[in-house]
Each structure stands twice: as structure tokens, then as C-alpha cells.
Amino acid sequence: MPGTALLTDRYELTMLQAALADGTAQRRCVFEVFTRRLPPGRRYGVVAGTGRVLEALADFRFSDDELAWLLDARIVDRATVDHLAGYRFTGSVVGYAEGEAFFPGSPVMVVEGTFAEAVLLETVVLSILNHDSAIASAASRMTSAAVDRPCLEMGARRTHEGAAVAAARAAVVAGFAGTSNLEAGRRYGLPTIGTAAHAFTLLHDDEPAAFRSQVASLGTGTTLLVDTFDVAAGVRRAVEAGGTDLGAVRLDSGDLAVLAVEVRDQLDRLGATGTRITVTSDLDEYAIAALAAAPVDAYGVGTSLVTGSGAPTCGMVYKLVAREGADGTLAPVAKASPWKVGHGGRKAAARRLDDEGRAVEEVVVSGPDTAVRSWRPPSGDLRPLHVPLVTAGETDDRWTGAGGVALAVERHRTSRAELPRGARRLSADEAAVPTVTLSL
């Protein structure tokens, strides 16, 4: 697998060069990932991509070819190249568990190490967390609107091939039941779905021949696409080919709410009462919610999930919040700007729950570094949010691979269930849970 060290911006290396030259590169630092605001209309975000960040960190090494290029292109000088040749992250990372809901000001990830170690991780961390959290946040709205009906991720053809794998993973974290993307299935143990497109029907001399071929190859449990020509005729031919035990039919065009009712009635009259109806065709959370009363059994979602319009960025940033002073202690630092407010110092986080187990506040704890580091919730109504991800350079592998996805799926299910009831509304509103600061 290619290394991840050059998935970064030039200024991270030029800052390193200057810091190495002036002697500040080895100062211990704390960087924090957070967002100042949620996208318009969003009431909560979903942390996703944590496992991928840890996987990228394990591969964050500079190869000989990459170092030679940096030198030849005059990106950095020889001393910096020599330093990068031995780069290893030996610091620590804590953060929200993948799948957790988050809000403006939530310190979703905290990276601690020397400046030389931690500054280089900004772009790779943000590119993963911003992308995957945007997808998961959109997916959570869709699975919430679908209630108990499964959503299936089918967006690979609408995005970059690498992003398609990440999007499939993030969608499953937020409750999608499976993906059409085989690489995502192989890499992360995700259920894969898919049978045939219109091209398969058009390949054959007629629709009945296509249906008979698919059933003969894939069995009666397959899903037949019935809207290539006439839907009613397609449904009749599908049952003729697969019998009353046919697994499902799929609708990919037209007025899905009306068609679903008509197709359900026709299937029942033909005796295929157990045959399910899957709908696709540019679905988003609003279309899914509009189909709540229709006899639909599953939703296939693509474009609106994996593109920027359907999954707007969460706008996460990676900011230095504390650095080692001359006396060896960590001192808070922050940018002074009325437009981009920063809050210096290491932070801890917890969620305050009411008597019903519903979230009422996001509590961000700040104060002296040693006090924050050792802080534990003083009462039973506060649930701590930070979990250890990397300790002294060693990754907790529970959060990576297929196992990490399984943990994230469960965390999201639990986290979303404790949000206020109004958090799932699709109408524009403010964050579902306010963020408050607790000073030690």
C-alpha cells in the first residue's frame, strides 16, 4: 500500500524546516480537531474516519523516492530531509469514538507530540475526518428517515474511486446495511449488494429472457429490475420468471410513491406476498422521508450521499492549542481573531444526560493542563467522550479494520439514540445539544 506521508500540504514541511533550524521543533504540543459550526440545517454531526486516520498514521513514512523528490523539487533542505527519513509518530491521540455524534466546539480528536511530529499530520487527518464525517452525517439523516427499512450505499460511480471506498465505510458506520463497492467490502468486511442494471435486460432479446437468465444464475432470491420498459408488465414477467418466492423487484425511475403502491398490489394479487420492493433513483433523506407511508422495503442511495451537495463538509480544523514553554509546562495558545475564534489549552469532553438518558449538554472541560489531563466526570450524569486511540506511538488496533467498523456502528446506534427527540428533524434548526464550557 502506498505511504501517506505526502498526503499533506507543503506548508507543513516548510514550517518543520524553520522549526528545526530555530530549535523549536521538539517543543511538546497539543493539536485539537473541532468544527466551529455545523453545515446549514444540520442538528448534529457524526464522527467517522477515525479508523482510517489510524491506518494512515501507521503508513506515515517517507520513502527514499519521496525524500529524493522533496530535495530535487527544493521543497525543503537537506537537514529537513534527513529528519524526515526517520519520521515516526511517538505521541498520543485521544478522541471521540468513531460513530459518536458531535457538535460545534466538540474536541473530536486531540493529537499530542513534538511540533515536528504533530504538525505534519494536519492535512491527512483533516482530509479523512472531514470527508468521512460529512458522509456519515448525511447517512445518519437518511437511516433516521428510513426508520427500520434498510438503506444501501450505491454511490461508487459518482465519486473518486478512492473516495468511494471511504464513503461506503462511512455510510455503514452511520447505519447503512451494505454497499455495492466490492473493495470496501473486502477491506472492511462490509456486506455487499447488487444484481443487475438495465444493460443486462437490454442485452437480451426481450425482458422475459433476461429475467429467466438472472434467476437461473442467481436464484429466486435475486432482485429483478422491472422498470426498463413497462413496470406492470415487468412485475408480471418477474413473477413468471422467479415464481412467488422471488426475492425482490427494484424500481429506478418514475413516481416512486405511486409506483410502489401499484407494484405492491400487483405482487400481492400474483401471490408474491413476500417479494420485497427496493427503490433507487437519486434518493436523499427528504425523498426517503416522503416515502415513509409507501410499501417500500429498502432504499438504494448514491449521488446525494457521496457528493458535496448531499454531504456538505463539517469544516473541521486542526489547531495548535497548547505548546511547551521554557519551564517545560504546556501553556495554552490561540489565534486572536473575532472571525475565527480559538480557545487555547487542552480540553476534555463529556455529554450530560437527563434522567431518561437523553443528551442535554455537550460539556467541554478546560483549565490547567495537568488538571484537564487527569479530569474524570464527577457525577453519574456525565458520560466521558474521549477514548485513547494512540499511546506513545502505539495504535489501539480495535479501532481499525473490520473490527473498528463494527465498534463504530454500535457507537453510532447508541449515541444517536441518546440525542433529544427533535434531533432527527430534517427541517433547518440549531444544534440539537448546546455546548457549554466547564472550567477547572
Image (cartoon, rainbow, N blue to C red):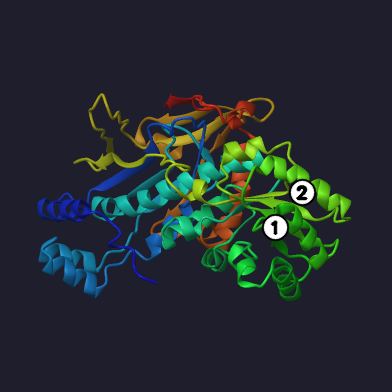
Q: Give the residue type that dot 1 points to.
A: Val
For the residues labelled 1 and 2, the Cα–Cα distance comes to 10 Å
C-beta proximity under 8 Å, tags 1 and 2 = yes
The residue wearing badge 1 is: 226
Q: Residue at x 65, y 72 (%)?
A: 204
Residue 147 visible in the displayed image: no
Q: Give the residue type that dot 2 points to.
A: Val
Placement of 2 over or under 234, stated as above or below: below
Q: In the figure, is residue 191 to the left or right of 36?
A: right
Residue 328 visible in the displayed image: yes
Residue 7 point in image, percent of width and height: 30, 59
The residue wearing badge 2 is: 263
Query: Which residue is nearer to you in this view: 363 or 237?
Result: 237
Q: Residue at x 44, y 33 (%)?
A: 38
Q: In the figure, is residue 290 to the left or right of 82?
A: right
Badge 1 element: loop
Query: Which residue is nearer to you in this view: 405 or 325?
Result: 405
Q: Residue at x 19, y 51 (%)?
A: 11
Badge 2 element: helix
Q: For residue 342, which quarter of the picture? A: top left
Residue 164 point in image, percent of width and height: 47, 58
Quarter of the image with the C terminus is top left
Mark 2, Cα crowd under 10 Å, few <14 / some 14-19 / many 20+, is many
